[in-house]
Image: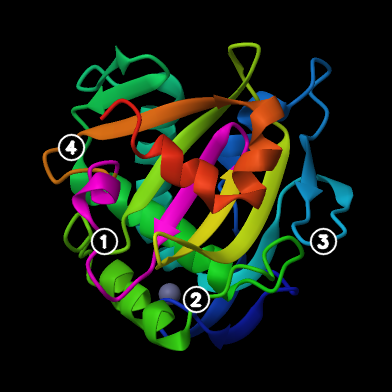
Amino acid sequence: MGKSDKIASCRLCGRNEPLVNSHIIPRFFFREMTDDKGQPFRYHIVHAGPDPSIKSGQGGIKEPLLCKDCDNKVIGSWETYASQVIFSGLPSTALDEVFPNTYKLTGIDYNKFKLFQLSLLWRSSITNREGFRSVNLRKKHENIIREMLLNNDPGAFNQYGCLMYMIQNGGVPFDEIIRADGASHIMSHKVQRFIIGALGWVFFVSSHRVPDKISNWFLSQEGELYIFTIEANKIGILIESSQILNTLLYQGK
Ligand SMILES: [Zn+2]
């Protein structure tokens, strides 16, 4: 353990341990952002709000939140799996364009990928790092998700389900952007939204059941996930208006 390691209560398991600098946004999302000369990856944090500002960052968004076991073994194992699903593709998974601008990913390990999604939502909520102050689950939901992560319990598909979309620029996946939009509502359900690289994540954190036309977009317990694509020049409208997202929900499926 290094001199700088701070001993404190791990936010996940609660044990007093030296805390490691945990990545709030997994390192693998930035893989595509390393430049040709191998310089550290850079990213842009785009703040939501009436006066949006853009800040650049480099080298990761980290904070000492977790003990080594929780960071490397627990969350690390879900991250490794998710990075393979998102970037490398796995022999067991398949991606097909099933409707215009809508892809279906099959063969996903529900437990691992859902727990990864939940860990992303939870980390974004507990961090104090810039760019994520607007993501704030109520303590009740923060605690429920912490218990789920700790118990390796992904919950039902419609519990804290996540609708995902891919942002493209002229048909090519867009990256270098991180944007947390915090809480808003879609069809009267509370959501937490953020964009990481090319992927948009919309978590439904309502306590009441979301309708099928939304939950059909969540990762199913059979390992199927629908993802729609949207052009970057439309994303401003998408962010500002839940109406557009509502409309998209009626497309395709
Ligand atoms: Zn721990």
> Is 212 situated above or below 39?
below
Q: In whole angstroms, how far apart are the C-alphas of marks 4 and 1?
A: 19 Å
The residue that disc 4 covers is 223
Q: Is residue 120 left or right of residue 249?
A: right
Among numbered discs 3 and 4, the one appearing first in the sequence: 3
In what element is the residue under mark 1?
Answer: loop
Drawn side of residue 157 relative to residue 247, left or right: left
Residue 48 is drawn in which quadrant?
Answer: bottom right
**Residue 73 in view:** no
What's the CA distance linking mark 4 and mark 2?
26 Å
Residue 197 magenta:
yes
Q: Which mark is residue 50?
A: 3
Residue 228 placement: quadrant: top left
Kind of residue sitting beneath label 4: Gly
Residue stretch rendered in magenta on the structure = 196-217
- For marks 4 and 2 on the same chain, the one whose residue lies earlier in the sequence: 2
Q: Position of residue 159 (x, y in %)?
A: 25, 64
Judge the density around disc 1: few (<14), some (14-19), many (≥20) Cα neighbours within 10 Å: many
Between disc 4 and disc 1, the foreground one is 1
Q: CA distance from mark 3 to mark 4?
A: 38 Å
Compared with residue 27, is residue 175 higher up or lower down, i.e. above or below? above
Name the N-terminal-most of marks 4 and 1. 1
For image coordinates 29% across by 51% down, the residue present is: 114
| Ligand 1 occupies quarter | bottom left
Name the residue carrying label 2: 137
Is residue 168 placed above or below 220 in the rendered structure? Answer: above
Element assignment for label 3: loop
Q: Judge depth for marks 1 and 2 and give the one in front.
A: 1
Pointer 1 residue: 210
